[in-house]
Amino acid sequence: MGTAIAHGGQGPEEVIRMAERQLWSGRFAEGPSEMTLSFTSSLAVDARLAWYDVAGSLAHARMLAATGIVPKEAAEALIDGLKQLLDDLEAGKIELSDELEDVHTNIEHLLIERVGEAGKRVHTARSRNDQVATDLRMFVRDAVLEIITLLIDVQEVLIERAEEELGTIMPGFTHMQHAQPVSLGFHLMAHVFRLQRDAERFLDAYKRLNQCPLGAGALAGTGHPVDRALTAALLGFDRPTDNAMDTVSDRDFALEFVYACAQTMVHLSSMGEELVLWTSPEFRFAEMPDAFATGSSIMPQKKNPDVAELVRGRSSIAIGNLVQMLTMMKGLPLSYNRDMQEDKPGVFSSYETLTSCLYVLAPMYRSLAFDRERMEEVCTEGFLNATDLADHLVQKGMPFRQAHEVVGAAVQYCLRTGKRLESLSAEELKGLSDLLDEGSLAHISMEACLNRRTSKGGTAPSAVREQVACARAIIDSHRSVCQGEIGRLESVWKELRK
Ligand code: ARG
């Protein structure tokens, strides 16, 4: 009776059946309680690793066959069974059982069900600890390649829009105050370069994560004559990892990924915020296309930039995941600890958060309607050309600090009299400094201010054209690395399934 209660009211026979379904039942006189089973289960989360788990098992089985660790006939049965499992998974014919604690247990059970005794040999020279690290690395590897592809889509739209707006003058801001005139194209290119560093971060993380954990075993390696280089090659990894204990306890690769996601989301969030501002009635720099806006259930007039707001809002999820995973890993003793099962929700959630935003941003930027006239109109406020007037005095020989004082006084004068620097009369200019005259006005038109900033990285159209060319070259190289890698992995999978 006691047993039945401990196992959620099941009879002794049922308890034995359940216990045997665990991969580790031998050591236990009784099976785990229902409560323990459901508390420790990770299937709801790690089921999405099923394909990688089978592919990893297939590579492992091929290595077991090649090294003779598993007899030929059994190894062939394993390989056939796993290939069949991959086909069935892709065809949606596989159902995983939530009575089994994780995806690895499920796959092993399915294999044994299908190929019988031979299936019981698949876990030779392997542990779930190296297995799960391998599965997750393969997931992150694909995620990185998908994310870079999506980042490139957003960058390309931004560059296209930037090229159309090289001569569109708008206020550049610092502290959210008018600072100096810039072109809209230049402003959009700033986002392109942010995203370019994000893509580089993902590619850089990729180099470190593309090493194969299989063969590390539980923590100490294995006495079986495994060929780790073969397993690594079969799964398209650059090479096997170096230290087994490090391998089963390392989640740096997942953390780097989640960090790169968070950093990218911080950039996207800033873009979302900008769109919220720009489409507001106070700014009116842009009109959100209807397709990317929503209305209000009570206020009939409303058109809200919810998509942009959600991009901004979802950055919190990516940041939260990073903090969660850093906190989970902090202070864990070597080597594998079950805490690490909690690595997957953050990885999956960051991946989904980021990709959902990247998907929506490309078409949204493509159809955003900029209001060039409005941008130009607001350039008349805020003395955007003050620095240029000071620079003009410097060219005439005045030390910059003194020129700064003179123009500061000019701004004060304009504020008092309701004027703009570019509308001061020759007399007023003379009154401010002997070095100023009517000719100075041509020097401080918004166009002149913009066109003069030809320094590398500056806002002048010629400088922005260079930035466009540079960004395109980098994007091309990212695209070719990424597509090369996607193609390489495709042939890896084809080869593995032969
Ligand atoms: N579900 C586990 C995880 O995600 C798999 C590894 C379990 N290993 C173990 N020794 N209990 O980390």
Image (cartoon, rainbow, N blue to C red):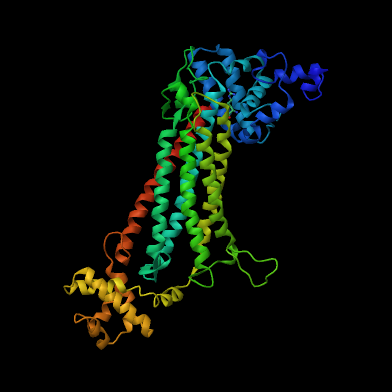
Relative to the observer, which residue lies in front, 433 or 60? Answer: 433
* Position of residue 318 in the picture relative to residue 113 (left or right): left
Question: In which quadrant of the rendered image does the N terminus lie?
Answer: top right
* Position of residue 401 in the picture relative to residue 262 (left or right): left
Q: Is residue 5 visible?
A: yes
Q: Identify the residue at image location x=56%, y=54%.
A: 313
Q: Residue furthest left?
A: 397
Residue 106, compared with residue 206, is above or below; it is above
Residue 25, compared with residue 321, is above or below; it is above
Q: Quadrant of ligand 1?
A: top right
Relative to the observer, which residue lies in front, 246 or 165? Answer: 246
> x%, y% of residue 30?
73, 16
> x%, y% of residue 153?
47, 53
Relative to the observer, which residue lies in front, 142 or 205? Answer: 205
> x%, y% of residue 14?
79, 19
> x%, y% of residue 97?
70, 29
Q: Is residue 58 visible?
A: no
Total label count?
A: 0
